[in-house]
Image (spheres, rainbow, N blue to C red):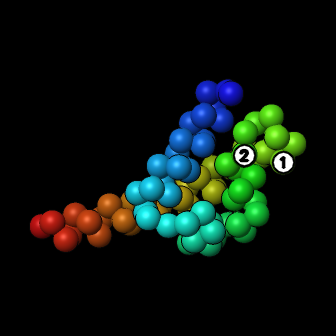
Amino acid sequence: MSEKEQAQQAFLHAAKDALGMTWDELAMAAGIVPRTFKNYRLPDDSKNHRAMPSLARDAVQRLLDDHAKKNRKKVA
């Protein structure tokens, strides 16, 4: 497993856990077709694996950032 793939998969799993969403919910919230999103999670030796473009990664990161902001407001 490449370092990039491991980072991509770890990022997606961490996002899913942090947001408390299913894979399909996360995909839709990020504006990514669920089937395409699944390809980003596959092992890199799978013929359907795809590296996640920065646009998709940025969309997931925005969801995480928004979630963190909402949680900070609840604590404050």
SS at circle 1: loop
**Residue 46: image location, x then y, percent:** 82, 40
Mark drawn on residue 27: none
The image shows residue 18, relative to residue 70, as above or below, that is above
Image quarter hosting the C terminus: bottom left
User: Few, some or many C-alpha atoms within 10 Å of disc 1 (few <14, some 14-19, many ≥20)?
Assistant: few
Is residue 30 among what the camera can see?
A: no
Is residue 1 among what the camera can see?
A: yes
Q: Are marks 1 and 2 in contact (CB under 8 Å)?
A: yes
- Residue at image position (68%, 27%) is 1
The image shows residue 15, relative to residue 42, as above or below, that is below
Tell me if 54 is positioned left or right of 35 in this view: left
Amino acid type, callout 2? Leu
SS at circle 2: loop
**Residue placed under numbered mark 1 in the picture:** 48
Tell me if 29 is positioned left or right of 44 in this view: left
**Residue placed under numbered mark 2 in the picture:** 42
Of mark 1 and mark 2, the one earlier in the sequence is: 2
The image shows residue 76, relative to residue 49, as above or below, that is below
- Residue at image position (71%, 56%) is 38
**Residue 36: image location, x then y, percent:** 75, 60
The answer to which image quadrant residue 68 occupies is bottom left
Tell me if 7 is positioned left or right of 73 in this view: right
Amino acid type, callout 1? Asn
Between 46 and 4, the one lying in front of the other is: 46
**Residue 14: image location, x then y, percent:** 47, 49
Between 69 and 37, the one lying in front of the other is: 37
- Residue at image position (15%, 66%) is 75
